[in-house]
Amino acid sequence: MLEQGFLKELGEKIEQGIAILRIYNDPEIYELERKRIFARAYIFVAHESEIPQPGDYVVRYVGDESYIVIRGEDGRIRALFNACRHRGMRLCRSEKGQAKTFLCPYHGWTYRNTGELIGVPAEKEAYGGRLDKAKWGLYEAPHVESYNGLIFVSLDPRAPSLKEYLGGMTWYLDLLTRRSSAGLEVIGAPQRWVVDVNWKLPAENFSSDAYHTLMTHRSLVQLGMAPSDPQFAMYGTHISAGNGHALGIGFIPEHLPLPPFLGYPEPVINALKRNYPSEAQVQVAEKMQFWHGTVFPNLSLLNAALPIPFLTFRVWRPMGPNRTEIWSWFLVERDAPEDFKRRSYETYVHTFGTSGVFEQDDVEIWRGITAMAGGPTAERFELNFQLGMHFQPDPTWPGPGTALPLDYAERNERVWLREWYRYLVSENPWQ
């Protein structure tokens, strides 16, 4: 049991801009997260382009639980708990595919791709005609919703709609997902790898930490793989969008000769001018140098040009207090020129793929923090999260949320931690 008073003390510290190191490698805190965050918040599981046709499915995870995310014969997208209703055997053991039915390998119970139980071997003899198959279909997650092709799942029947959950973050997601009327498409399977890292560290990093680029990625500036100014990530806006969602948008400073609209090809630029909901979003996109952020709790997104623009979504899937599986998708506008798609994918692989140079820099830092968080000294070791507390919000910012005038700040990490803490201590986070 967590010692009496620790969570109360932690809440008070977070309000002061202070965290305790142990939260990044504590088994009891991890158990609370499983039950109070991943069983309640909206979790990103797939993009609609991965399951375009009826019967298409992918197997994904909500926390550490396996779900079949499938477009049924009726066209509706569902998330079905990947367990047979007879004895709980894992039902689908392929990562993706196309199926009209699912057959349990244990006793042969058979389900439609919409979840209904339709076949039971020796049903008449074994159950005497008393089995009501209508009651024993696959368990379906109570909330499966999409926003601009992004599919999220919440296991809490009390959860609000996805649009309410995303709130002001939708304005910023539109910058990434509405550049084309054809929408985004996932290219290839998501890359996956396991690291000895607490899942919160990358989630916080992407929501807030432009500051680390000055040191962690300095060698890449020196190699010419990033803009020539080591402080390139400072010039931007630091935005808390509500409900724990947060991001930073870097803008092109006058002294860096970078192309507008991240250097996207002209057909994409022309399309976004037609498709963005507001002129303010066009103006933000024109000056944008990069976009990094996290949809609470564990979906992070990055749009950058190094030097070719690319877009990646990442899920930090917890596998324990000090172990995370990274899922990394590459996405591109469906109707973008084919040569651009190829070059964009290559840039993603070289920078933020499994062995990408930026990716290796980041993971090494997160591994080091997680290792230090597992000992007795870490139980009371305080961390300073006060960067940028002197900043005043920018009243001229055109988007929703609270915007600070520089991206070297930790307000978003404080906001993310407050939301994380609220879920841990709330019996009902929706009240």
Image (cartoon, helix red, strand yellow):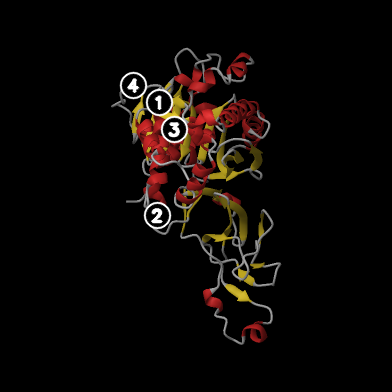
Marked residue nearer the N-terminal end (4 or 3): 3
Circles 2 and 1: CB distance less than 8 Å? no
Q: Are marks 1 and 3 in contact (CB under 8 Å)?
A: no
Q: CA distance from mark 4 to mark 2?
A: 34 Å
Comparing marks 2 and 1, which lies closer to the viewer? 2
Question: Is 376 rendered above or below residue 184?
Answer: above
How far apart are the alpha carbons under marks 4 and 3?
Answer: 16 Å
> On residue 391, which mark appears?
4
Kind of residue sitting beneath label 4: Phe
Q: Which structural element holds mark 2?
A: loop
Residue flagged by tag 3: what amino acid is it?
Leu
Q: Label 2: which residue? A: 159
**Residue 2 at x, y percent in the picture:** 46, 42
Residue at image mark 1: 237
- Mark 3 sits on what residue? 247
- Amino acid under disc 1: Thr
User: Is the C-beta separation of discs 2 and 3 under 8 Å?
Assistant: no
Using a 10 Å C-alpha cutoff, classify the residue at mark 4 as few (fewer than 14 neighbours), some (14 to 19) or many (20 or more).
few
Secondary structure category for the residue under label 1: strand
**First along the sequence among labels 2 and 1:** 2
- Horizontal arrangement in the rendering, residue 255 relative to residue 328 (left or right): left
> Which residue lies at the image location 60% right of the left edge and 40% below the top edge?
324
Judging from the image, what secondary structure is the residue with disc 4 in?
loop
What amino acid type is highlighted by mark number 2?
Ala
Q: Position of residue 300 (x, y in %)?
A: 51, 38
Q: Nearer the viewer, residue 354 or 66?
A: 66
Whichever of labels 1 and 3 marks the residue nearer the N terminus, that label is 1
Looking at the rendered structure, the secondary structure element under dot 3 is strand
Q: In the rendered image, which quarter is residue 323 located in?
A: top right
Q: In front of the other: label 4 or label 3?
A: 4
Q: Which corner quadrant of the image does residue 312 belong to?
A: top right
The tag earlier along the polypeptide, 4 or 2, is 2
